[in-house]
Amino acid sequence: MQNATEHTGIITRVNGPIVEARGMEYAGMQEVVEVGELRLMGEIIKVRNGVATIQVYENTTGLRPGEAVHCTGRPLSVLLGPGLLGTIYDGIQRPLQRIAEVDGPLLLRGEKVPPIDFTKSWHFKPLCKPGDSLAPGHPFGEVQETQSILHSILCPPKVSGTIQTIVPEGDYDGNTTVCTIRQEDGTLQDLTMYQWWPVRVPRPVQEREPLLEPLLTGLRVVDAFFPIAKGGASAIPGGFGTGKTMTQQALAKWCDAQIIVYIGCGERGNEMTEVLREFPQLKDPRTGRSLMERTILIANTSNMPVAAREVSIYTGITLAEYYRDMGYDVAIMADSTSRWAEALRELSGRLEEMPADEGFPAYLPAKLAGFYERAGKVTNLRGTIGTVSVIGAVSPPGGDFSEPVTQHTSRFIRCFWALDRDLANARHYPAISWLNSYSEYLVEVAQWWKSKDHEWKTNRGELMELLQKETSLQQIAKLVGPDALPDSQRLVLLIADFIKNAFLQQNSFDEVDMYCSPEKTTWMMRLLVKFNHRAQALIQKGASLGEINSLEHLPRLLRMKSEIPNHDTAKMAELEQAISSDLDALERRLNS
Amino acid sequence: MKMPGLVYRGVRNIDGPLVFLDGIDGVAYDELVNIVAPNGEQRLGKVLDVTSHAAVVQVFGGTDGLSPADTRARFLGHPLEVPVSRDMLGRVFDGLGRPKDGLPLPLCKERRDINGLPINPYAREYPRDFIQTGISAIDVMNTLVRGQKLPIFSGNGLPHNRIAAQIARQAKLLNEKVDFAIVFAAMGVKNDVARFFIDSFEKSGTLHKVAMFLSLADDPSVERMITPRSALTLAEYLAYDEGMHVLVIITDMANYCEALREIATARGEIPSRKGYPGYLYSDLASMYERAGRLANGTGSVTQIPILTMPNDDISHPIPDLTGYITEGQIVLERDMSQRGIYPPVAGLPSLSRLMKDGIGKGRTREDHPHVASQLFAAYSRVKDIRSLASVIGEEELSPTDKLYMQFGKAFEEKFLAQGEFEDRTIEQSLALAWEMLHILPRSELLRVSEEELQQHYDTLTDASVVEKITQDAQ
């Protein structure tokens, strides 16, 4: 790394993760520097009169004024190429597995392990021949990264030209030049399978596309009630213990994106370990391959340095954009964006900036907007469609959604899954409230659902209406007791109960119930709606609530989520038949 | 460069626990400082902020009696360290790891930086070993596992200390014979509380495997910042170097956070909620995260921090941020305590996040997860029905709702409540749970499977339950 032109400065002040250094006239904003004798990694965030303010991504204990700061001349970047999938990185893309092999179980400082093992060989297949012209973002080769993911080797976004040489198909490592191109100005550019990209700069695309397809998550409350579109942005706010992480993990396991980037931002170390231990055992319901093969983990646990926490979500989204540029559907889980915002606040406080709401810096909304806007469905530079869906957890203090992070976030997302403390207390998971959540993607994705079940939208509307009605009836029932209500209203309470227990509540540890296919979801919705219609009609005809509640096959309706496998439509139809004949029998009895 | 031993005389400003030094050179961030008061008394401090010629030092012993002209400071060239050794078990220390029991410091091979180093998430082992505490409310509903951090959220006057002592006394693993070593850290608590724990350990004959770090209410408040870190440094050494299983009890985190706020205010930092600094979360996490297991090690650190919620308010920043970091919480309820229920573990807000993987087939019993879920669901229904009953009167409730009321009462008085020295096995606790569920009609139990109902519900007859309950009552 060291060369004659390297610029160095001298540390003048150390205050936690913020370091000031003088003699930094040549340092650029956002440039990466190596600080002190240990060469800790940092980034320049302010330059004034030759004094640079640096945020250091590692613990600064023992650093003293007078030590040197080395400039590297490049902005904070991530390395992109085959070998990313299945790995766990820290916030600045250091591979935690190899660090553990080198340093043991504790994270030492100043460690510089390259993000990807360059000595590992990949089987490269060229897609071009000498003489072909290569445009930015177009692939010139491909590598089978995992069994299910074909990794296109893309020309970096700002490079183009005519291919001079390209290697034949074969195994090459990361240091090998696999392709040489002559650029328009006549210079030659060597390309390896890897490229760097600055994390704070969104990767360019051709065009943004409308979001029309749902991101199927396997969670009924999301798919049926508050759907998110592929390329959409969603927030999960909830107080502690309401199941943010559990919901994020369930989404990471079962959503139908091809690549998952899971960012543990300021959260528990054990949670990352859990994902690391559990995902390799689980199978992707669509490809049958291990879930870990499609997952990249970024871990900045709550005891790791706070400055790296600020960067971790940018690292994550840049990796996501890279796979999007190949044409994949990528989903990114950021757990939790509040910790990221708090990292901003902490750094801002150390910089002695003027605080806005609750001590957060005034640029918090701008930063949040910049992050969520990197989600989207796009035509990438190579002309294919790729998506990045962002699902961010928010941890409002005291579970109070009026705090700045929740409020600002809700301005930049279109899907809001509010977690409810009472539901969580009753262990009703996922604890997504049907009263406070919303999804603006509903209109866009309704068309897609229509192809699965043309009544999807009316069924959804009806179930939602029942739940709304139940809420207002409950208020009356709380005053007079449910028994004082007429049977038709008590039926609403009963069916709302069915919707909650048999449909919305989902057991993530039950082998059948943990993932619900769109077919089964539409079946279940249809069954519940139909049952509601028939039962209401029977009540009108004089049936009592007790008679309806004691129908022989009713318990099967309540257990269908765990007792009928996802693709067993025959069993679903049979259940529909059984319930319907129960109701018929009751009707005959009433008529006679 | 570095010149340990160089003594600086004179300080510029003194403000609360902070001392501002001028004209210094080569001082490192977080370095330990020896402050010598005019009367010759020595106090330790650490560097909070340093520029080329000035430093801000936080003094652990307090700044009483320091004068700007006659105070001397010696920078020691290393961050704060505590000695660690197996021989520290059975001893009492102050917050900085200096013996407080009148005996000399045990022979220690090394001293360690109290801040520790973060554990690489890749090198962690996911905690899954069920710890039987013998308390039904914890074992069945909020299971503690080895390597977990599970705080007790309490209030003033609630029996959190007795519960912590009971856990320490009864904790055992089901299929392994292990002796837990106990590291106890007290910050700002009264002398009697420390006395209570010492007595309790003495009575159960475990005092020889307890190391205590005491920084009591009359010790300088700044020392509380160091106490839990000293204790955790020893715990980590015992767990990861000596392969022991360590239970760390820390009380009271509220006092720690107040000390933190004091320092932040003295430094003129921009406060966040209720005057606590914006980095309270990171700071708490740097301690709570020091629990766990390593993938290739035998030992473990299990943390049971105790915090008293100011005004019993769970949304106060201290319990709130703690709940976001720890793996669940045991919440104590004043109302239940007033009714004489011990332990007054609140049914609904308590939670153990690691429970799901520590229980079930091959760990506790196959039906355990479903039973727990059913108890939560039923008890939450009880709460709804109680508020209904308070409006319309108990007489007006439907027959099913009346059964729920009965269940609620039995659940609190028979299942949750138990003796301070009563050690129930998990089998006993689960059997008791089924007895409680048997009060409810079979059709209400949707969260347990049909087979489980057949095996555990149908085998109980109403008569046998009534008999059992009346027997217990006598």
Image: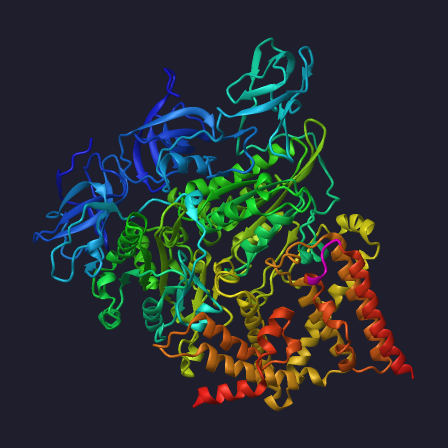
Q: Is residue B418 left or right of residue B228?
A: right
Q: Which residues are magenta?
A: A563-567
On the rendered image, what quadrant is the N terminus of chain A found in? top left
- In the rendered image, residue B403, in percent from the top left (x then y), is placed at 60, 84
Asked whether residue A240 is drawn in magenta, I would say: no
From this view, report whether residue A187 is shown above or below residue A398.
Answer: above
Magenta segment's dominant SS is: loop
Q: Nearer the viewer, residue B273 or B146?
A: B146
Q: Is residue A474 left or right of residue A89?
A: right
Q: Is residue B277 left or right of residue A66?
A: right
Q: Residue at x 66, y 86 (%)?
A: B398
Whether residue B346 is visible, yes or no, is no
Q: Quadrant of residue A491?
A: bottom right
Q: Quadrant of residue A113?
A: top left
Q: Residue at x 51, y 83 (%)?
A: B409
Asked whether residue A566 is drawn in magenta, I would say: yes
Q: Residue at x 45, y 35 (%)?
A: A94
Q: How is the image coloured?
A: rainbow
Q: Is residue B64 left or right of residue B158?
A: left
Total marks in image:
0
Whether residue B404 is visible, yes or no, is yes
Q: Quadrant of residue B307?
A: bottom left
